[in-house]
Image: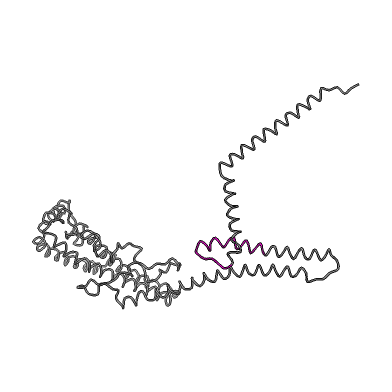
């Protein structure tokens, strides 16, 4: 609910806006007389409504159509006499989009600062400070939404006035998910898949008279330097982890080979007279050595395809490549055997074998029946 003072202030702003629109209509009709018909139609539609309320949405000043060149029908906008007017609106809309986008970035920096302050100083201190912080966040979030809507209005106008123009390299469609950053959102826990929104990468015009566009140094320092440093640190840490994983794979295989040799040495350390005990010890030691070698082969066969798929060829690959080829050939053979054609063929062979077995059983029964007819009596 709004207070009476808030409603009075709102009405004053609406009255001021309505006066500005009425003062603007006269020069608009001078420079763009084609708008007169559209304005008269809009006014007639408002008067034709039954008992229009002063607070009806169509009568509010903020909802009155301005009929700028970008909102005119295509057959009117393409007239030669409106070419200069359209160019003037385009010159107006580009700085509007640039300023609105800068305002979105500024508000987002404020919001991120609020969340950081809340996490460090307010979390866990009670409901009242948290409620005040949330109210403050909503206030800045509304300002961000207004700036974003202002940018969208300018972007739609530019898309109509000059589709695919030079402005399209800097300004893109602003969706809801693009209004984020700088940095990760509080609920985002992923580091490897984080990408900054394009709004932080848009170059800004330094001098309107020159075509050169660069990112302002101050803005770059405030928004991108920290994120770039974090991303570089994560990249270097992940690159190091890849090398560590390769080294761990190598050590596993080297350790299993060393353990197999260690077991083989254990087979001949005890000099016993009893050959039975000596052979048992030797057999157990060689069995453990074979298990270690088999573990090394299993690890190599499992790891090598993944490493080669990523362009990594370890030093121990040549020793186990033939096992990978054999494992691949075995899998292909298994797939071929389990194919529908082979399954149907094997099923037919099984049916034939079953029929042959049944015929053999029938012939045995016939022989037994015939045997019952023989008389072995006196």
Residue 304 forms part of the magenta stretch? yes
Residue at 13% from the left image edge and 56% from the top image edge:
79
Magenta stretch: give its range.
293-315
Nearer to the camera, 361 or 104:
361
* Picture coordinates of residue 262, whole percent (x, y): 71, 70
Query: To which quarter of the image does residue 121 belong?
Result: bottom left
Query: To which quarter of the image does residue 84 belong?
Result: bottom left
* Picture coordinates of residue 214, whole percent (x, y): 28, 73
Q: Quadrant of the N terminus?
A: bottom left
Q: Which residue in the rendered view is the most extreme toward the left?
A: 30
Residue 21 forms part of the magenta stretch? no
Residue at 67% from the left image edge and 70% from the top image edge:
258
Residue 350 appears in the rendering = yes
Most common secondary structure along the magenta stretch: helix
Q: In this view, does 338 lie above or below 199?
A: above
Q: Is residue 218 above or below residue 166?
A: below
Q: Is residue 161 left or right of residue 119?
A: left
Q: In this view, does 364 lie to the left or right of 144?
A: right
Query: To which quarter of the image does residue 130 belong?
Result: bottom left
Q: In this view, does 189 lie to the left or right of 274?
A: left
* Picture coordinates of residue 358, whole percent (x, y): 70, 32
Nearer to the camera, 112 or 254:
254
Residue at 64% from the left image edge and 35% from the top image edge:
351
Residue 128 appears in the rendering = no
Q: How many numbered marks have been drawn onto this rendered protein structure?
A: 0
Its colouring scheme is one colour
Q: Quadrant of the C terminus?
A: top right
């Amino acid at each position: 609910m709004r207070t009476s003072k808030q409603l009075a202030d709102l009405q004053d702003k609406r009255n001021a806006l309505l006066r500005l629109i009425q003062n603007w209509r006269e020069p608009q009709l001078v420079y763009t007389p084609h708008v007169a018909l559209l304005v008269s139609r809009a006014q007639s539609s408002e008067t034709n409504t039954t008992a229009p309320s002063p607070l009806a949405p169509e009568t509010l000043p903020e909802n009155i159509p301005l009929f700028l060149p970008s909102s005119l029908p295509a057959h009117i906008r393409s007239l030669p006499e409106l070419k200069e007017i359209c160019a003037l609106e385009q010159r107006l809309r580009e700085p509007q989009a640039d300023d609105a986008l800068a305002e979105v970035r500024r508000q987002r920096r404020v919001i991120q600062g609020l969340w950081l302050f809340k996490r460090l100083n307010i979390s866990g201190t009670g409901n009242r400070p948290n409620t005040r912080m949330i109210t403050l966040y909503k206030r800045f979030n509304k300002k961000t939404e207004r700036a974003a809507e202002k940018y969208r209005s300018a972007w739609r106008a530019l898309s109509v006035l000059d589709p695919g123009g030079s402005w399209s390299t800097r300004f893109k469609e602003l969706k809801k998910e693009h209004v984020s950053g700088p940095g990760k959102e509080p609920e985002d826990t992923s580091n490897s898949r984080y990408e900054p929104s394009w709004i932080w990468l848009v170059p800004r015009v330094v001098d309107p008279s020159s075509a050169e566009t660069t990112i302002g140094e101050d803005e770059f320092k405030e928004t991108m330097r920290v994120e770039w440093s974090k991303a570089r640190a994560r990249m270097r840490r992940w690159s190091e982890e890849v090398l560590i994983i390769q080294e761990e794979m190598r050590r596993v295989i080297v350790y299993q080979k060393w353990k197999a040799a260690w077991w083989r040495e254990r087979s001949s350390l005890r000099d016993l007279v009893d050959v039975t005990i000596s052979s048992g010890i030797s057999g157990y030691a060689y069995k453990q050595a074979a298990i270690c070698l088999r573990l090394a082969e299993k690890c190599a066969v499992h790891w090598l395809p993944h490493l080669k798929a990523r362009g990594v060829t370890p030093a121990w690959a040549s020793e186990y490549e033939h096992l990978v080829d054999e494992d691949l050939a075995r899998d292909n053979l298994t797939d071929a055997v389990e194919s529908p054609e082979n399954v149907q063929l094997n099923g037919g062979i099984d049916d034939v074998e079953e029929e042959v077995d049944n015929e053999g059983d029938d012939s045995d029964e016939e022989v037994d029946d015939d045997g019952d007819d023989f008389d072995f009596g006196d």
